[in-house]
Amino acid sequence: MKNLKNLTLGLSLLSAVALVACGSSQGDWNTANTAGTVAAYQQFLNKHPNDQHDAAARQRIQTLQDDQAWKSAQTTNTVESYQGYVTAQPNGAHVQDAQQRIAGFESASAWQTAKTTGTEAALQDFLQKYPQSTEADQARTALQQLTYVVQLGAYRSSSLADKARAKLQDRFGKDLQNVVVVPPAGKSKIYHVASANMTQDQAKSACMMLKKAHERCEVVKRPAEGG
């Protein structure tokens, strides 16, 4: 009988200890939630490593760290800061936003370069790389303004035109942006050698440079597409 009483007393004490521990755990969990900080949840985990709230505490730490990293990236607001966020939080909630902002910075930088260069090749290259960017319409508009060419010569055979093109490309390719052979159109049998499409001012400047080098040239409207 005495042993039974001792057993009952022991079980009661264990139950009481368990209840106290449970109460202490829940209280600490409530405290961590009230604070809502990484440090508070980490302190809870250190004190109750195998608690029923273990997974929730770790998830909230991850969420808080993710939000802090994102706010930091937004505050700095550079390609590097968003790349740093993606590296630090590869599974973060804001990865897609970060990637979009990186793409936005990159397309804006590429557009400034293409716009400053102002050549048909630069604008086409920009559109090929960033067809859906916010600057794409500006690039298309700029291309539509390249309505002149520097006409450099007319030839009756493609071989003569190709030889002239190669010579002029070698000497003046940079100033003319590019030298091309324009095949005959309609009933014509004449091959023309001309510059890349340019604005009128660009074409006039290039032709003036060629004339100073004793090369014949003429600024003309580029042929209509399909004409």
Image (cartoon, rainbow, N blue to C red):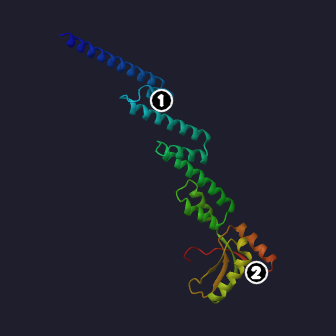
Q: Position of residue 117 (x, y in %)?
A: 68, 62
Evaluate if marks 1 and 2 touch, with contact meaning CB atoms under 8 Å apart: no
Q: Horizontally, is 13 left or right of 48 in the view? A: left
Q: Nearer the viewer, residue 19 or 90?
A: 19
Circle 1: is it few (<14), some (14-19), or many (20+) Cα within 10 Å?
some
Q: Position of residue 126 (x, y in %)?
A: 59, 61
Q: Amino acid at mark 1?
A: Gln
Q: In the figure, 102 relative to 165: above or below?
A: above
Q: Position of residue 109 (x, y in %)?
A: 63, 54
Quadrant in which residue 203 is drawn = bottom right
Q: Mark on residue 14?
A: none
Q: Earlier in the sequence, mark 1 or mark 2?
A: 1
Quadrant in which residue 6 is drawn = top left
Q: In the figure, 139 relative to 101: above or below?
A: below
Residue at image x 39%, y 33%? 55
Q: In the figure, 168 relative to 141: above or below?
A: below
Q: Amino acid at mark 2?
A: Arg
Q: Nearer the viewer, residue 141 or 93?
A: 93
Quadrant in which residue 172 is drawn = bottom right
Q: Horizontally, is 199 left or right of 215 in the view? A: left
Q: In the figure, 151 relative to 5: above or below?
A: below
Q: Gap between marks 1 and 2, in whole Å? A: 79 Å
Check disc 2 and report the residue beneath it: 216
* Of labels 1 and 2, the one closer to you: 1
Q: Horizontally, is 143 left or right of 200 in the view? A: left
Q: Horizontally, is 135 left or right of 204 in the view? A: left
- Residue closest to the far left: 1
Check disc 1 and report the residue beneath it: 42
Residue at image x 26%, y 16%? 11
Q: Tag 2, which secondary structure?
A: loop
Name the image quarter holding the C terminus. bottom right
